[in-house]
Amino acid sequence: YRGVDILELTEYSNFLETAFMLIYGELPDAVEFKKWNETIVRRQKLKFRIVDIMKNLPESTHPMSVLQAMIAILGAFYTDANYSEDLEYDTITRLIAKTPVVMANWMRMRRGDEPIRAREELNFSENILLMLTGKVPDSEIAKILDKCLILHAEHTMNASTFATLVVGSTLADPYKVISAALGSLSGPLHGGANEAAMELIERFQSPQEATAELLRMLERKDKIMGFGHAIYKDSDPRNEVIKGWSKLLAEEVGDTVLFPVSEAIDKTMWEQKKLFPNADFYHASAYNFMGI
Ligand code: COA
């Protein structure tokens, strides 16, 4: 990203610092980071009217539909049309801060649980897990989530970035721009592959069962979600990283099925089709182990 190796960023940076670098071109200095971090963590909350709107949605609504709608609706609450650098900073920090709050609130509300407020003494990713689970997370697990967010942060001209540029070029407000991008991200051939990969992995009780069914699916010419890439032809550089974390988390939570099944699917796809997992594939099990 911006000339820095993602492996270096996942090792030494954090998601908010990486996001700052992607947006402003350079890593922040200590003063810039303090302001950036504090502003975003302070904004990890939603106005009660926004929560009320969410409460009126059917609980079966897909989280990505909720997110797309609620990000567009944020634009109705933050309407200042006169451009300034302060407004730009406010809008960017709001979007970064509130996106996971919408997701976490929805995950709880659709089960009938009350949303949980973020805490200013926790960091961005710790707050995401707190808002999802109601428990202050293990800091190592929160660090892995933070690194996953770094891997997702940038991916050149993918479909959602393209949608962002198309809608942004019309001078639509930033909330509508990101909302449009989220619509694109939700599709199963893009970010939706993550969920589809999980649905596939969860179907199997053992690696043997997974391999046998995969062979049948390939025979039928089914598309296997979480494999292949429009640009990478040999491997996805993010994959080794996320695969390692998924394995670590599997050990942490005592998983004996999801990770071995994932590896069996991975092996079969390579042997049969020379197709490699993209970053979505092992993110599926990694997020599952985190309780997402
Ligand atoms: N499962 C089964 N077969 C696949 C496949 C998959 N996931 N991905 C590609 N193939 C097949 C193609 O059908 C094609 O077969 P053909 O030569 O018999 O027509 C061959 O592999 C080469 O495909 P390629 O040109 O490399 O891919 P693409 O650019 O057409 O498509 C994707 C790229 C990402 C859209 C595609 O791989 C896909 O749909 N993957 C699943 C969804 C996914 O994981 N998306 C997240 C991307 S980060």
Image (spheres, rainbow, N blue to C red):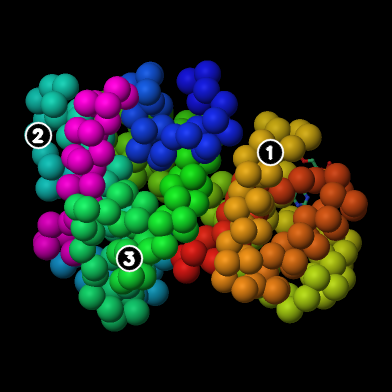
Label 1 within 8 A of ligand 1 by Cβ: yes
Report the front residue among 198 and 206.
206
Residue identified by numbered label 1? 236
Q: x%, y% of residue 10?
A: 52, 38
Q: For residue 153, say whether it is visible.
A: no
In this rendering, which labeled residue sits more in front, label 2 or label 1?
1
Element type at marker 2?
Answer: loop
Label 3 neighbour load within 10 Å: few <14, some 14-19, many 20+: some
Q: Quadrant of residue 282?
A: bottom right
Contact flag, marks 2 and 3 (Cβ < 8 Å): no
Circle 2: residue type: Asp
Q: Is residue 282 above or below residue 81?
A: below
Q: Is residue 41 above or below residue 216?
A: above
Instruction: Left or right? Give the position of 187 relative to 38.
Output: right
Q: x%, y% of residue 17?
A: 36, 33
Instruction: Provide the residue span drawn in magenta.
Output: 28-51
N-terminal of the pair, mark 2 or mark 3, is 2
Question: What distance separates the C-alpha of mark 3 from that of mark 1?
Answer: 33 Å
Residue identified by numbered label 3? 136
Question: What distance separates the C-alpha of mark 2 from that of mark 3?
Answer: 36 Å
Question: What distance separates the C-alpha of mark 2 from that of mark 1?
Answer: 41 Å
Q: x%, y% of residue 87?
A: 14, 29
